């Protein structure tokens, strides 16, 4: 497996693949890989001749009081996990390689990047959209793979690619969970054992919300109330946000109709902010009705 820390070396390897007519997939990550990331890699390997996994903890998407320094990193461990995948190359640049000078250019989405998590973390999606644009320009992939767990991020990237006419297919991959339902996340290792056990409350609340939607809930509010009660019963959970939005646009919904909606939740356990989501599809709701 080749590991590139420089843009030039990454580009040279990709040029060889393209000369052979190979298709290229990219899986952008911040490393500290787990089975959720590996599901994206597996999918990318199934659909492309060559796959680039990028590992870069991007400082520009962290706010001044966020967990940039505490974010877990272990490149050796990540490389060991990726060794199982033939045809994968890794792009793991330094901050100086990605940002040799202060940026004067950025990619901003409004309102999509400024609502929900974007409202709680000003500048976060500017950092994400800009670094993903840079990674897309470096790798020039045919397809790019993102997890549904970070649902707003996936929506932002889809919209960015559409708005900017990028010739890249964005593939969303369902959330991979621990056996008890907790969404896998690199941040889970920072949870205390007690908070780790408590964090499953998010999946339980989402199960309840989805069940109410599938049973025909006509408005978001009773669903949100039932979910808030479940989360409030777990004293270790500090609910930060809970929303039901149009699954495609993330617009607010006042009445639930046949359009798919997404339930978005963020909560703190200690100083660790976890996020999770659940899409309630039209077909599933109509079957249950
Ligand atoms: P991160 O390293 O957290 O930036 O995540 C890199 C990519 O992996 C993003 O597209 C995430 O949405 C995706 N991802 C993270 N956790 C999971 C999970 N549990 N299931 C599926 N995809 C995930």
Image (cartoon, rainbow, N blue to C red):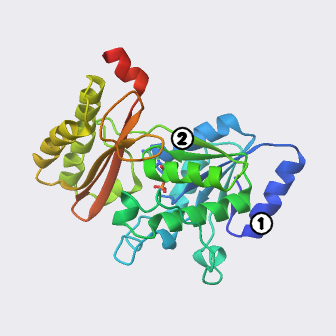
Instruction: Using the image as rendered, state which of residue 256 and residue 129 is in the foreground.
Output: 256
The correct choice, above or below, for 67 with respect to 199 in the image is below
Q: Residue at x 64, y 73 (%)?
A: 98
| 220 up-or-down from 268: above or below | above
Q: Is residue 150 visible?
A: no
The residue labelled by disc 2 is: 172
Q: Is residue 19 left or right of residue 152?
A: right
Q: Which residue is rendered at x = 38% and y = 46% of the image?
A: 184
Q: Which residue is mark 1?
A: 9
Left or right, 234 with respect to 23, comes to: left
Q: Residues within 10 Å of mark 2 (few under 14, many from 20)?
A: some
On the picture, is 106 further left or further right than 13?
Answer: left
Q: Which mark is residue 34?
A: none
Q: Is residue 135 above or below residue 33?
A: below
| Label 1: which secondary element | helix
Camera sees residue 82 = yes
Q: Quadrant of the C terminus?
A: top left
Residue sitting at x 30%, y 35%: 255
User: Measuring 60% from the left and 55% from the top, which residue is drawn there?
Assistant: 160
Q: Identify the element where label 2 is drawn.
A: strand
> 149 or 70: which is nearer to us?
149
Residue 35 in percent (x, y) is at 46, 43
Kindly report which numbered mark, 1 or 2, lies closer to the viewer in this rendering. 2
Nearest the eye: 268 or 73: 268
């Amino acid at each position: 497996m080749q590991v590139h820390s420089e843009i030039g070396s990454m580009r040279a390897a990709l040029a060889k693949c393209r000369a052979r007519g190979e298709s290229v997939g990219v899986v952008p990550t911040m490393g500290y890989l787990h089975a959720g990331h590996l599901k994206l890699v597996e999918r990318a390997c199934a659909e492309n001749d060559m796959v680039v996994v990028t590992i870069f903890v991007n400082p520009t998407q962290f706010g001044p009081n966020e967990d940039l320094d505490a974010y877990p990193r272990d490149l050796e461990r990540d490389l060991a996990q990726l060794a199982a995948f033939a045809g994968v190359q890794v792009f793991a640049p330094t901050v100086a390689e990605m940002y040799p000078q202060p940026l004067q250019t950025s990619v901003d989405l409004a309102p999509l990047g400024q609502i929900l998590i974007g409202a709680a973390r000003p500048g976060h999606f500017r950092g994400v959209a800009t670094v993903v644009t840079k990674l897309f320009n470096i790798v020039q992939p045919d397809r790019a793979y993102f997890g549904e767990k970070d649902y707003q991020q996936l929506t932002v990237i889809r919209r960015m690619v559409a708005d900017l006419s990028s010739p890249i297919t964005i593939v969303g991959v369902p959330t991979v969970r621990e056996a008890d339902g907790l969404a896998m996340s690199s941040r889970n290792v920072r949870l205390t054992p007690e908070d780790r056990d408590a964090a499953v409350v998010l999946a339980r609340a989402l199960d309840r919300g989805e069940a109410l939607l599938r049973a025909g809930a006509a408005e978001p509010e009773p669903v949100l109330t039932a979910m808030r009660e479940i989360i409030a019963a777990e004293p270790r959970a500090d609910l930060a946000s809970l929303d039901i939005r149009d699954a495609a646009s993330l617009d607010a919904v006042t009445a639930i109709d046949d359009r798919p909606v997404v339930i978005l939740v963020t909560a703190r356990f200690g100083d660790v902010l976890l996020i999770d989501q659940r899409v309630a599809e039209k077909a599933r709701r109509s079957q249950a009705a």
